[in-house]
Amino acid sequence: MTQFENENRAQDILKARRDRRQIACTGPGELPMDAAYRISRRIRDLRTDDGERVVGRKLGFTNRTIWDEYNVHAPIWGYMYDTTFHDVSSAETPFSLAPFCEPRIEPEIAFAFTRAPRAGASDDELLSAIAWYAHGFEIVDSLYKDWKFEAADTVAAFGLHGAYLCGPRRQVADEDAALLRSALQSFQIELARDGEPVDTGLGSDVLGSPLSALRHAIEVIADDPDADPIRAGEIVTTGTVTRAFPVKPGQTWSSTVSGLPLDGLRITFA
């Protein structure tokens, strides 16, 4: 795609989001992945020009159990903003779904860096660069009807990122590194809708561990000459532990975390 075509696509995607309007996806092979990431970066620039601030990155499709469902067979990443990251550790008011077209909910693990991570770092070095970790819900949203798209379409359209609802944080410095590494592989999250369980996922489903997914993102971003490296202070969400489920106003979604010292979440949507 030409620079002019990338610019038009970026403007169309951003306007569709603001208008809460879905758009057509591209056909197979029409949008190369490198062009999709250029569109993503252009949208980032447009959003920051309008006053939004990048606070981190979101990873998508790190859970290999859902690849066939979406016909996407490799992880992606996108930007997360101060307007989309929400601290819900003590939230009591419903979270509005009004900005979204076809929202779905994903229980995830997020990490925040106290210093810039290094590509190729060992597990211990990577953990030493992390300030805190937390469990949260990502609200993912598709600008493409019925969640039908090419992988590159998801990259161009915000990495499907709508919002991240972050629960209570745990300081990594307070943890035993070896125990935490093991727990991140074996923990599980049960997801429930209106009190009824709908799915359970394991940490190992996320590229073997959310820590492995984090390392993958660091290395992919470091290998991209056009991408800004992950910096100190950034928050990175590592992808859903369970399948993603449609969410509607009036529903209450909750999670139970086993094997990690993290509280579950309970969110009612409006």
Image: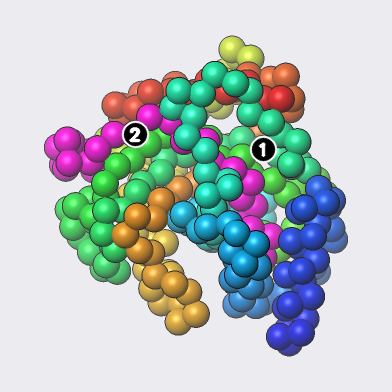
In this view of the protein, which residue sits in the foreground, 98 or 39?
98
Specify the amino acid type for callout 1. Answer: Arg
Of mark 1 and mark 2, the one earlier in the sequence is 1
Q: What is the three-letter code of the residue carrying label 2?
A: Arg
Number of the label disc, if any, that sits on residue 169: 2
Query: Is residue 216 toward the left or the right of residue 104 in the image?
Result: left
Residue 3 location in percent, x, y?
Answer: 71, 85
Q: Which residues are magenta?
A: 155-182
Q: Which residue occupies 26% across, 46% down?
A: 131
Residue 103 sits inside the magenta stretch: no
Tell me the residue at 61%/76% (across/down): 38
Q: Is residue 134 above or below residue 12?
A: above
Residue at the (77%, 69%) spot, across then down: 11
Please identify the residue farthest to the front as the structure is shown. 51
Q: Position of residue 47 (x, y in %)?
A: 63, 62
Q: Which mark is residue 104?
A: 1
Q: Counting other residues with Cα less than 10 Å from the Cα at mark 2, is it few (<14), some (14-19), or many (20 or more)?
A: many
Q: Residues within 10 Å of mark 1 (few under 14, many from 20)?
A: many
Residue 50 is situated, as x and y percent measured from the top left of the image, at: 65, 62
